[in-house]
Image: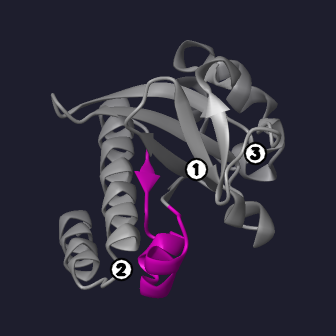
Amino acid sequence: MLFTDLLEEQKFCSQINDEQKRNRAVANLLGIKIALDFFKNSGLPATTDSAAHKIKILLQDLDIADIYIGDIRLDVRLSLSQDEYLIPKKHYENNITPDLYMLVFYDNSTGEAKLTGFISPDDVNKTIQDEYYYIISKKEITPFEQTDKLFDSLQTKARTNLPLNVKKKI
């Protein structure tokens, strides 16, 4: 089912006329695939069943790449640079910030991806920015190795709805 959905989304991306929007949508889908593979390999139940990016107009017009672990919504931010990540200003303007941003470095030359870490929308430094994005440096990110603390501090009742075995894995 996921493969079919992803295939449909990829087909839709090819129909986006604006090259910048098309490239962004393709990058978001790649980030989602990387994140889903990561969580699958970690034994965590990640899904895109109720994700906003599945709505065609949102995939085209908003920079959104959301996945869910239980009721926790993550937005995957894919970067071709190890040193900085871009967080869309539109997420704040449209009140669609996730519970956490998942930051992934993708090495275009090797095709390899590395989970850099996570950042809470509340921790995004909004002083460094361009017209469309807040620019986050690697030093602001909670490293993957410290993820337990970040998930433990996540203030959402959704976390309490996760099965006990999932809480221990996060």
Q: Is residue 169 left or right of residue 78?
A: right
Q: Estimate the spatial distance between the alpha carbons at disc 3 and disc 2, rounded to whole Å.
A: 28 Å
Quarter containing the N terminus: bottom left
Upstream in the sequence, badge 2 or badge 1?
A: 2
Based on the picture, tell me whether residue 55 belongs to the magenta stretch.
yes
- Residue at the outermost top position: 145
Which residue is at 49% across, 48% downward? 76
Q: What label sits on residue 74 in the rendered view?
A: 1
| Amino acid bearing label 3 | Pro
Q: Is residue 48 above or below residue 119?
A: below
Upstream in the sequence, badge 3 or badge 1?
A: 1
Upstream in the sequence, badge 3 or badge 2?
A: 2
**What residue span does the magenta drawing correspond to?**
45-64
Q: Position of residue 133 (x, y in %)?
A: 64, 53
Q: Estimate the spatial distance between the alpha carbons at disc 3 and disc 1, rounded to whole Å.
A: 10 Å
Based on the picture, tell me whether residue 161 belongs to the magenta stretch.
no
Which residue is at 37% across, 36% downward? 80
| Image-quadrant location for residue 81 | top left
Q: Secondary structure at mark 2?
A: loop
Would you name the residue on which mark 2 appears?
18
Mark 2 and mark 1 in contact? Answer it, CB < 8 Å: no
Task: Report whether residue 6 is seen.
Answer: yes
